[in-house]
Amino acid sequence: MKAYRRIILCTAFVLAGLGSARAAELAGKWKAEFDTQIGAQKYTYEFKSDAGKLTGKAAFERPDGKGEIELKEVKATKDEVSFVELLKYQDQEIRIEYTGKFTNDDELKLSRKVGDFATEELVAKRLKEK
């Protein structure tokens, strides 16, 4: 019985470590440019990992202006990534849900669901530190 518990605990630690490894891989800056119903948009996403907890922010340039926003619900597991952007538009808050996968160490293929209005596909590429 003790051996069985050890196997379960070891497996749990390995799986937790894989999530932390992906969190560390997501950390850094990523850039994306894509077309939407309202025009071209440019985003720079920045993710940080602190003790396995992911946080993020995004700087954007859209037809209605430039800005920066904190990202919510940032997660990275195995090959998948997800996060949420809360957009303020005409006194309404629109939830933009991002889901995607690492296509390699320097590229994320993302789907962006903008409320109930639209879904957009984009690719974010890692910015190399100089």
Image (tube, grey):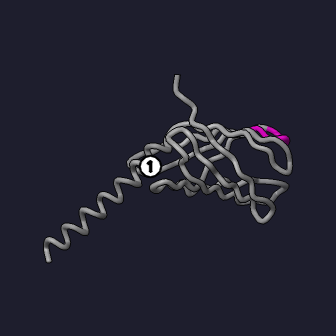
Q: Nearer the viewer, residue 115 or 33?
A: 33
Q: Is residue 13 above or below residue 47?
A: below
Mark 1 crowd level (few <14, some 14–19, many ≥20, 10 Å Cα): many
Quick check: is 29 in the magenta stretch?
Answer: no
**Residue 55: x and y, percent?**
52, 48
Magenta: main secondary structure equals: strand
Q: Residue 68: x, y in percent? A: 68, 41
**Which residue ends up furthest to the left in the rendered image?**
2
For image coordinates 53% across by 48% down, the residue present is: 102
Question: Which quarter of the figure has residue 59?
Answer: top right
Left or right? Give the position of 13 relative to 24. left
For label 1, the residue is: 22
Residue found 64% across the figure and 37% down from its top: 31
Question: How far across and how far down the image is residue 107, in percent?
Answer: 57, 41
Specify start and end residues of the magenta stretch as a single range: 61-65
Number of numbered discs visible in the structure rendering: 1
Which corner quadrant of the image does residue 126 belong to? top right
**Residue kind at label 1, given as amino acid type:** Arg
Residue at 44% over, 49% down: 22
* Left or right, 50 with reference to 67: left
Q: Is residue 114 above or below residue 23?
A: below
- Looking at the image, the residue that sits furthest to the front is 103
Q: Under tag 1, what secondary structure?
A: helix
Q: Position of residue 1 (x, y in %)?
A: 14, 77
- Left or right of residue 5: residue 97: right
Q: Residue furthest bottom?
A: 1
